Image (tube, rainbow, N blue to C red):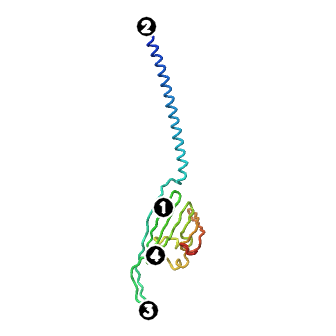
Amino acid sequence: MNISRKLKFGLAGLVVGMASSFVFADNVWIEEQRAEEMRSLIHDVLAEADSRSSFLGDGSSPSVNVHGFLQTRWSYNDIKTDGVDTTHGFNVPRTRLEVSGDLYDWGYKVSGQWNDGGNFTLMDAYADWGNFRVGQFKSPFMKEVLTAQTDTLATERSVIASQFGQGRSQGVQYGYETALSGVTVAYTDGFNTANGAGV
């Protein structure tokens, strides 16, 4: 009777061992299947994210730069006419505020200026994309006028620039530069037509 009990316990242990090994093998197979499905899901999500990121341009963050400048001068006018007083004093010919930056693949600039009398005038309002510019900007004509006001040596530009300078206008512009030279062409609504003055 002791032998048959040992045999029964042995057979029962063998059956339990075989059943647990099948369950263990089944669990390993399920875990491997889940891991493979998870890898496939992660791969699909990353591929979808890459395809959507192409809409964001070069991936750079939008930026906003606020800056400006103020120009002052002191003038003295000794008038040699009877009954006319000599004039002198400080004044502020221009106070400019500029907002510029990047919006993904696009660059932009908006600027305005107050004069001595306190009147505000919109100066620039354009967007750049690649080599193109669209909006209100200085037309590509006459280097002296294209030089920024902050980079000139005098407070005012020359008489020639005042008479023949193009000022600002609305339109579209294309520019291409190489290491040695460059070319810029524009289609606009004419010279000195800023803020619809030529319409």
Q: Are marks 2 and 4 in contact (CB under 8 Å)?
A: no
**Dot 4: what SS?**
loop
Give coordinates of residue 21: x percent, y percent: 48, 22
Mark 1 lies on residue: 101
First in residue order: circle 1 vs circle 2? 2
The amino acid type of the residue labelled 4 equals: Asn
Q: Nearer the viewer, mark 4 or mark 3?
A: 4
Q: Residue at x 56, y 77 (%)?
A: 164
Looking at the rendered structure, the kind of residue marked 1 is: Gly
Which marked residue is nearer to the observer: mark 1 or mark 2? 2
| Image side of residue 111 versus residue 185, left or right | left
Q: Nearer the viewer, mark 1 or mark 3?
A: 1
Q: For the residue carrying disc 1, how many other residues have a C-alpha within 10 Å: few (<14), some (14-19), or many (20+)?
A: some
Which amino acid lies under the numbered mark 2 shown in the image of this protein? Ile
Q: Secondary structure at mark 2?
A: helix
Dot 4, crowdedness within 10 Å: few (<14), some or many (≥20)? few
Q: Quadrant of the C terminus?
A: bottom right
The circle drawn on residue 81 is 3
- The residue that mark 4 highlights is 119
Q: Answer with mark 2 or mark 4, whichever residue precedes in sequence.
A: 2
